[in-house]
């Protein structure tokens, strides 16, 4: 049997309406929707909801797509956590279909496509992205769609797919600029190993120009705001760089799951052996090197892992011991479901392996209780203090929670120095009373005449547990001088 990847003509011509793959995709979306109200809002969801209330071309720490998804979701489906998670559940189903399509494109038969769909549906990170509205959520869909078009351009020699690559990639910049990593790494692969004849196809360059044209407003925002994405990247490098480098290799094996990682290695080898797809094989180590050098997160490369897995399924479907692989995937599925989805009771999360393996879980509980307890402090203030008080949140998740339940608990306006929220400005000059969350009385005491801890956040299984709630009176300086001191990026 030849080791070169060959495109199955019958697979390409036959309709994709294959019931098993579609069933896997639909079942996954249905399960994700069913469990969507469990736990509660993730801190990023509360932040995106808050950003979506202030539509802009861009924000300091994120392009506008995910906040706009949050805005549309709450407008169309209602201001609930379930509403925010409808789009993620649908995105997960589409990613499953696209990965199966990549397997088919590489010559995989029906069994290989089902294996690709099932392996993706039970992988940890796709489930996390499908359960919670994160920037990762639309990224997975847009990256997988871009890669499928790249495969079709390289394998079929049909230049029209370069146009689609440009359009999708340009649109992807409105979610994260990381799509440049995918295109740049594959570009290096084409220059190093070919097929270089694609560089003569004018449609490739038309696609590149389209990508730039579609992304232009986002690029203009970056240029006119001193490249905030680079500033955020530097802040994250300082904050998380060492940890990201230490955990990079282990997470490459765990982001999808160990069996998927094994299949991905086989997929890399398969792509390498075919001159038409060798660029895709080269792209992965190139992207790894760039990510390690820049101290980026390991999950930035999940789009690469998905296409390696898709390629590996072509071979794995023919293994004599494929039943062992299926059994391993089944075990991984159980682990992934427990880790990625809200299966463990929220009160039992602290100290469990789930809380260590999936930080999204512990960041999705207790935000409602935080807002309620801050409300109790606010309503305990003397009437003259309560009338002009404002809230000061230590991070964007807390700010999002206090905004989300402001009407229910009668909360005043919230301000924060975290990321984009710092740019929204300080409280009005003349503000005398501040109720602050996630600060210390000693720290705030340097800029206020008096501060005292009014309460401690309790009864939560999340990361806000034990955070102090401080009440401060009479700033010692104008707010215009205080505000630069509370600014922080991470």
Image: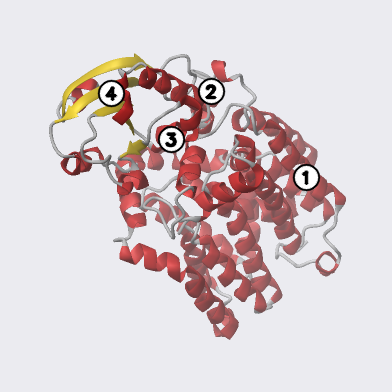
Q: Are marks 3 and 4 in contact (CB under 8 Å)?
A: no
Determine which residue is flagged by label 2.
Answer: 353
| CA distance for labels 1 and 2 | 29 Å
Can you say whether 189 is above or below 419 in the image?
below
Q: Which callout, 3 or 4, points at the residue further toward the start of the chain?
A: 4
Question: For numbered disc 4, what is the local secondary structure?
Answer: helix
Residue 254 point in image, percent of width and height: 56, 38
Q: Which callout, 1 or 4, points at the residue further toward the start of the chain?
A: 1
Determine which residue is flagged by label 3.
Answer: 397
Q: Which callout, 2 or 3, points at the residue further toward the start of the chain?
A: 2
Q: In the shown orientation, is residue 398 left or right of residue 381?
A: right
Q: Which mark is residue 26?
A: 1
Can you say whether 196 is above or below 484 in the image?
below
Q: Which callout, 1 or 3, points at the residue further toward the start of the chain?
A: 1
Determine which residue is flagged by label 4.
Answer: 385
Q: Residue at x 66, y 78 (%)?
A: 160
Closest to the observer: 34 or 129? 34
Q: Which callout, 1 or 2, points at the residue further toward the start of the chain?
A: 1
């Amino acid at each position: 049997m030849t080791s070169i990847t060959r495109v199955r003509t019958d697979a390409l011509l036959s309709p994709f309406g294959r019931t098993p793959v579609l069933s896997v995709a639909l079942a996954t979306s249905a399960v994700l929707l069913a469990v969507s109200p469990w736990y509660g809002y993730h801190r990023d969801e509360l932040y995106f909801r808050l950003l979506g209330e202030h539509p802009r071309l861009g924000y300091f720490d994120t392009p506008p797509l995910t906040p706009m998804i949050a805005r549309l979701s709450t407008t169309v489906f209602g201001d609930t956590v379930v509403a925010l998670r409808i789009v993620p559940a649908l995105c997960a189903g589409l990613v499953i279909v696209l990965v199966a399509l990549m397997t088919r494109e590489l010559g995989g038969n029906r069994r290989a496509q089902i294996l690709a769909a099932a392996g993706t549906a039970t992988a940890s990170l796709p489930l996390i992205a499908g359960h919670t509205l994160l920037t990762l959520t639309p990224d997975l869909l847009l990256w997988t769609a871009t890669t499928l078009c790249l495969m079709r351009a390289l394998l079929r020699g049909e230049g029209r797919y370069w146009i689609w690559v440009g359009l999708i990639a340009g649109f992807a910049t409105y979610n994260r600029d990381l799509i440049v990593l995918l295109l740049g790494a594959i570009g290096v692969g084409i220059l190093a190993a070919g097929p270089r004849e694609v560089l003569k196809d004018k449609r490739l360059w038309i696609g590149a120009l389209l990508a730039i044209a579609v992304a232009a407003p986002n690029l203009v925002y970056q240029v006119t705001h001193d490249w905030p994405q680079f500033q955020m990247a530097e802040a994250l490098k300082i904050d998380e760089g060492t940890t990201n480098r230490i955990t990079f290799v282990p997470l490459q094996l765990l982001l999808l799951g160990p069996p998927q990682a094994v299949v991905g290695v086989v997929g890399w080898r398969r792509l390498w052996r075919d001159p038409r797809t060798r660029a895709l094989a080269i792209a992965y180590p190139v992207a790894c090197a760039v990510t390690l050098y820049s101290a980026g997160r390991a999950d930035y490369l999940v789009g690469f892992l998905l296409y390696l897995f898709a390629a590996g399924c072509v071979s794995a479907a023919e293994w004599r011991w494929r039943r062992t692989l299926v059994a391993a995937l089944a075990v991984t599925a159980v682990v992934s479901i427990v880790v990625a989805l809200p299966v463990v009771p929220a009160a039992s999360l602290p100290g469990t392996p789930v809380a260590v393996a999936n930080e999204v879980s512990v960041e999705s509980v207790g935000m409602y209780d935080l807002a309620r307890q801050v409300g109790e402090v606010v309503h305990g203030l003397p009437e003259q203090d309560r009338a002009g008080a404002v809230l000061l949140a230590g991070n964007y998740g807390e700010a999002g929670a206090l905004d989300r339940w402001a009407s229910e608990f009668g909360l005043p306006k919230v301000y924060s120095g975290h990321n984009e929220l710092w740019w929204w400005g300080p409280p009005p000059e003349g503000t005398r009373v501040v109720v602050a969350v996630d600060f210390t009385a000693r720290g705030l005491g340097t800029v206020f005449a008096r501060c005292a801890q009014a309460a401690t956040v309790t009864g939560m299984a999340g990361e806000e547990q034990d955070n102090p709630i401080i009440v401060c009176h009479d700033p010692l300086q104008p707010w215009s001088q205080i505000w630069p001191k509370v600014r922080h990026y991470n």
